[in-house]
Amino acid sequence: MGDNNNNSENAVIYYSLEEISKNTGLNGTKCWIIYKNIVYDVSDYITEHPGGSELVTEYGGKESTKAFDDAGHSTDAKNMLKPYKIGELAMEDRNQKGVKKNIKSPDTPYRRGCLNIVSCGLLG
């Protein structure tokens, strides 16, 4: 579980995208999200999320930074994440310029956001 490159108590644990993608919050799995290259286990929080658990599990096992920021979360909401931190995204899996490294979990259904539907001309 994770890659611990240091034996000290404060060592950072690094998780690969592949390992994170298995923790979708669906089918009895933990719900891990990535926010700004930090990995959070939000399993114990999803039922308390004011917008509903589906909004969290939609990003379970995936990068959630853009969606989290686009939702306009407050500083308080960002601070609420801190106790759920379990590690960081492995260096080799962090976004590189022009390369998106996100693995879609096979348990996660494809969802098109409202903006995608509007921009495709399917609404209105």
Image (spheres, rainbow, N blue to C red):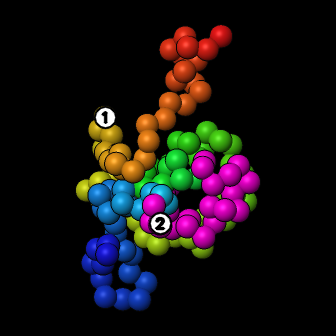
- Which residue is found at the position 33% from the left and 52% from the top? 94
Q: Is residue 81 above or below residue 2?
A: above
Asked if labels 2 and 1 touch by Cβ distance under 8 angstroms, the answer is: no
Task: Determine whether 85 is above or below 16 in the image.
Answer: below
**Secondary element type, mark 2:** loop
Residue pictured at 34% horizontal, 69% vertical: 14
Q: Amino acid at mark 2?
A: Gly
Mark 1 to mark 2: distance in Å? Answer: 34 Å
Label 1: how many residues lie within 10 Å, few (<14), some (14-19) or many (20+)? Answer: few
- Say if 56 sits above or below 16 in the image: above
Q: Which residues are magenta?
A: 27-55
**Going 60% across and 44% down the picture, which residue do you hit?**
69
> Which residue is identified by label 1?
98
Mark 2 residue crowding within 10 angstroms, few (<14) / some (14–19) / many (20+): few
Residue at 73 percent across and 59 percent down: it is 76
Comparing 109 with 113, the one in front is 109
Where does the N terminus fall, quadrant-wise? Answer: bottom left
Tell me residue 124's x, y (percent): 65, 10
Task: Say which label, 1 or 2, has the lower sequence index.
Answer: 2
Q: Secondary structure at mark 1?
A: loop
Q: Which residue is mark 2?
A: 28
Query: Is residue 40 visible from the viewing direction of this image?
Result: no
Q: Position of residue 68 (x, y in %)?
A: 59, 47
> From the viewer's perspective, is the residue at label 1 or at label 2 nearer?
2
Horizontal relation, residue 103 to residue 64: left or right: left
Q: Which three-letter amino acid code belongs to the residue tagged 1?
A: Gly
Q: Examine the image and state in which quarter residue 96 appears.
A: top left
Q: In which image quadrant can residue 23 be found?
A: bottom left
